[in-house]
Image (tube, helix red, strand yellow):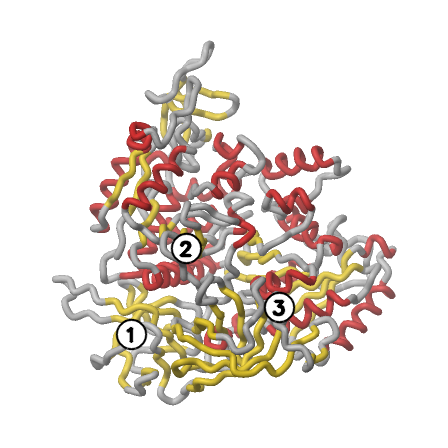
């Protein structure tokens, strides 16, 4: 890796969907290996493990299978994060298992991703799992999909096989509202079209996977229209040097804020103007997602954590009842009339399930309306009533102000992940 | 549009968000300060998160008694510079109390004993959240660690029963007696940390840079001369030109041969490195799941 230009790199977060059998771990191992992100001692360690297990060649999948149980059972059971960088970009991979019972893990990995890699075994074509992964990616608002048709070496690098899978995927995904889908024929095991262009598929003239990851445009994925600033903490030094300083710390969740902007404070509805914007001691001329800043205001208004600063000419929805798509994350079933604790931006409120509209069969994309038992890994459309008004945008418009988690008040566990419709 | 943050700006924004979130969600947090570059970076990020207010929590250092002297001097100066309270737990105190037992053998390591002293100090200080400089790229068990990592009332980590973490929404709810470890720089790599140190001009202890030191080469690990290291038959110290890539106890932290005597050279060296930074940590090599086992018991 070159150090030159490193400071100008940007950051791409992506998730990989597919099961062990699709060669997902091998693909990640290949990406890291061919970008020289694997160190000698790591390689030696997996060489030793491969030998112990009796694998014939070095098993690149062992790089990503971190925990004891996974190495023993040969499956990935949780979200693991991997890192590599090229001179252009730093990459964060959320590596999640693809089995049906792990929908919740895929949802977790996808929640922060800019891009999803969907792996298809060239021999099997599109299977139930492919549609499940694609649906989750679209529901989680991932803007870029890269369909990797893997194991091309096992179908004689056939263009016909690739084209047929591509055509079928285009047909079925057309209903899912995915803006940017790219298709790449690869062999993760042999390295074709992962980092280096394949010598076996001269009929494919597109980018390799790494070139695609390096070049996909992600800046426009952020919302720069609806200015939203959930207040995280009030900063009051009350020191001799800063006796009257009163700043509002938080992360910009949409739009652009500048000193002098007219803003409205929710829920009070009071209005004022932005005085200054700081990152520590540096004064900024503008703040946008995903910056963490501290904002001071012209008037002394009572503001606390959970409040939201928005531009006065662009207000979010303010409601107590919201409709959401929810992925259930917990062993304990959803209580169809139960009370939960809801976390939304920096806000926290009690809420109650008012209505379950339907459950999604994520393999067939059919709506189930005659069974409202909500179990772990289920995806449902529900209505929640919150004990106080929420300030939100639809998830589709703004991930930051359109997402919630549900917490069980007794176990304190995170039991649901919701996207406001 | 030019509304673009580079990777270091994004990582900084994320870490600052985590600090502010933890301070709001927990009653009595503390930074676990090891004296190494990651925890020094952590203190700098905490400073930025709450500026112009002071860092609203203390530093906690677990002193094994086997530290590099340079680390302790640096630690005390740093606490003074940031105006932050320093709380120190001594492994020797745990040994004296009988809650920890020194390893047998000629060169005992106190590395595993740190966990005992740490848990005792967390309980004594009633700290309900401890910030750590752990990074997911460091070690395979850490790759699955959460930003907000739940610990049961015995301080233990259960990797199979972790709370899902989605978007920017962090759940720090807990029962009495339970606690959290919080890792603001989870998504940073070793290179990110070094680049950030350069960008922000963060001061580091001198032992990160190339210098002459008396060293014994024990099975490939370059150990410094210290009162805690007993030479084995046939061994002798020799002066070598070295630096440290990570900092731990003098008894287990291996040096590397290096001419990198400034930040630019260190960054160049890290970029060209062919082994991980924990590659010369004897503690990780004890078994394939050594880190996972220690983490379950309450290690950082």
> Which residue in the structure is indicated by mark 2?
B184
**Tag 1 secondary structure:** loop
Q: What element carries label 3?
A: loop
Front in this rendered view, residue B265 or A375: A375
**Element under disc 2:** loop
**Residue B198 seen:** no
Q: Report the Cα–Cα distance between label 3 and label 2.
A: 32 Å
Using the rendered image, report if marks 1 and 3 lie on a common chain: yes
- Spatial CA span between label 1 and label 2: 23 Å
> Tag 3, which chain?
A
Q: Which of the marked residues, 1 or 3, is nearer the chain's N terminus?
A: 1
Residue B249, quarter of the rendered image: top left
Closest to the camera, between mark 3 and mark 2, is 3
Query: Residue A55: x, y in percent?
Result: 75, 38
* Residue B141 image label: none
Residue B72 as seen in the image, left or right of residue A289:
left
Q: Nearer the observer, disc 1 or disc 3? A: 3
Give the mark toward the camera: 1 or 2.
1
Quadrant of the image for the C terminus of chain A? Answer: bottom right
- Residue A73 location in percent, x, y? 68, 45
Between A393 and B103, which is closer to the camera in this rendering?
A: B103
In this view, the residue farthest toward the top is B234
Tell how many labels.
3
Residue drawn where x is 42% and y is 36% of the image:
B260
Q: Nearer the viewer, residue B123 or B198?
A: B123
Q: Rate crowding at label 3 as few (under 14), some (14 to 19) or many (20 or more) other CA atoms within 10 Å.
A: some
User: In the rendered view, does B161 fall on the left or right side of A265?
Assistant: right
Name the residue tied to disc 3. Answer: A375
Asked if residue A206 is positioned above or below residue A35 in the image, the reply reads below
Residue A208 position in % (x across, y down): 70, 59
Q: Residue A304 carries which label?
A: 1
């Amino acid at each position: 890796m070159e150090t030159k230009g490193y400071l100008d790199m940007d950051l791409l977060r992506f998730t990989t969907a597919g099961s062990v059998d699709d060669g997902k771990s091998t693909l990640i191992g290949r990406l890291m290996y061919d970008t020289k992100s694997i160190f000698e001692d790591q390689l030696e360690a997996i060489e030793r493990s491969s030998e112990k297990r009796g694998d014939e060649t070095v098993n690149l999948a062992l790089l990503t299978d971190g925990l004891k149980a996974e190495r023993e059972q040969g499956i990935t059971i949780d979200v693991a994060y991997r890192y590599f960088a090229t001179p252009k970009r730093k990459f964060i991979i959320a590596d999640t298992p693809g089995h049906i019972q792990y929908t919740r893990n895929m949802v977790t990995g996808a929640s922060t991703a800019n891009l999803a890699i969907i792996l298809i075994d060239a021999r099997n074509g599109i299977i139930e799992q492919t549609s499940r992964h694609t649906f989750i990616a679209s529901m989680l608002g991932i803007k870029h999909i890269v369909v990797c048709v893997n194991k091309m070496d096992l179908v004689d690098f056939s263009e016909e096989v690739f084209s047929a899978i591509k055509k079928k995927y285009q047909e079925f995904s057309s209903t899912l509202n995915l803006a940017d889908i790219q298709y790449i024929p690869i062999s993760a095991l042999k390295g074709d079209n992962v980092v280096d262009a394949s010598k076996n598929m001269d009929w494919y003239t597109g980018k390799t996977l790494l070139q695609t990851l390096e070049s996909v445009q992600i800046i426009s994925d952020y919302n720069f229209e609806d200015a939203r600033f959930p207040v995280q903490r009030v900063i009051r030094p009350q020191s001799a040097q800063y006796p009257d300083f009163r700043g509002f710390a938080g992360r910009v969740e949409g739009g652009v804020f500048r000193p002098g902007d007219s803003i409205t404070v929710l829920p009070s509805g009071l209005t004022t103007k932005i005085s200054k914007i700081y990152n520590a001691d540096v004064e900024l001329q503008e703040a946008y997602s995903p910056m963490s800043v501290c904002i001071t205001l012209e008037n002394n208004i009572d503001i606390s954590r959970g409040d939201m600063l928005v531009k006065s000419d662009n207000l979010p929805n303010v409601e107590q009842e919201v409709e959401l798509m929810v992925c259930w994350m917990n062993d304990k079933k959803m209580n169809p009339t139960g009370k939960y604790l809801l976390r939304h931006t920096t806000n926290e409120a009690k809420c109650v399930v008012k209505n379950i509209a339907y459950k999604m069969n994520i393999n067939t994309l059919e709506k189930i309306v005659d069974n409202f038992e909500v179990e772990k890994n289920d995806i449902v459309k529900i209505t929640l009533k919150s004990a106080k008004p929420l300030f939100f945008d639809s998830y589709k418009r703004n991930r930051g102000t359109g997402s919630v988690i549900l917490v069980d008040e007794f176990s304190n566990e995170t039991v649901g992940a919701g996207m406001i419709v | 549009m030019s509304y673009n943050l580079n990777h270091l700006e994004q990582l900084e924004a994320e870490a600052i968000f985590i600090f502010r979130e933890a301070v709001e969600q927990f009653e009595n947090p503390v930074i676990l300060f090891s004296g190494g570059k990651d925890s020094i970076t952590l203190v700098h990020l905490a400073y930025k998160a709450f500026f112009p207010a002071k860092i609203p929590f203390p530093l906690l250092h677990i002193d094994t008694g086997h530290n590099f002297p340079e680390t302790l001097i640096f630690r005390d100066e740093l606490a003074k510079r940031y105006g932050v309270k320093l709380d120190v737990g001594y492994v020797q105190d745990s040994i004296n109390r009988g809650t920890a037992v020194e390893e047998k053998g000629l060169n005992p390591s106190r590395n595993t004993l740190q966990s005992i002293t740490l848990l005792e100090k967390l309980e004594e200080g009633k700290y309900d959240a401890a910030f750590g400089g752990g990074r997911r790229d460091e070690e395979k068990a850490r790759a699955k660690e959460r930003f907000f990592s739940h610990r049961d009332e015995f301080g233990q980590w259960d990797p199979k029963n972790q709370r899902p973490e989605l978007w920017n929404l962090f759940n720090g709810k807990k029962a009495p007696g339970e606690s959290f470890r919080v890792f603001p720089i989870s998504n940073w790599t070793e290179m990110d940390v070094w680049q950030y140190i350069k960008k922000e001009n963060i001061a580091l202890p001198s032992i990160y840079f190339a210098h002459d030191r008396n060293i014994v080469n024990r099975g490939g690990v370059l150990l410094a001369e210290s009162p805690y290291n007993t030479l084995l038959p046939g061994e002798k110290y020799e002066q070598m030109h070295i630096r440290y890539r990570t900092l731990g106890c003098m008894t287990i932290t291996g040096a590397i041969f290096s001419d990198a005597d400034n930040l630019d050279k260190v960054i160049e060296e890290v970029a060209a490195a062919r082994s991980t930074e924990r590659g010369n940590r004897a503690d990780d090599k004890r078994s394939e799941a050594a880190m996972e086992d220690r983490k379950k018991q309450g290690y950082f």
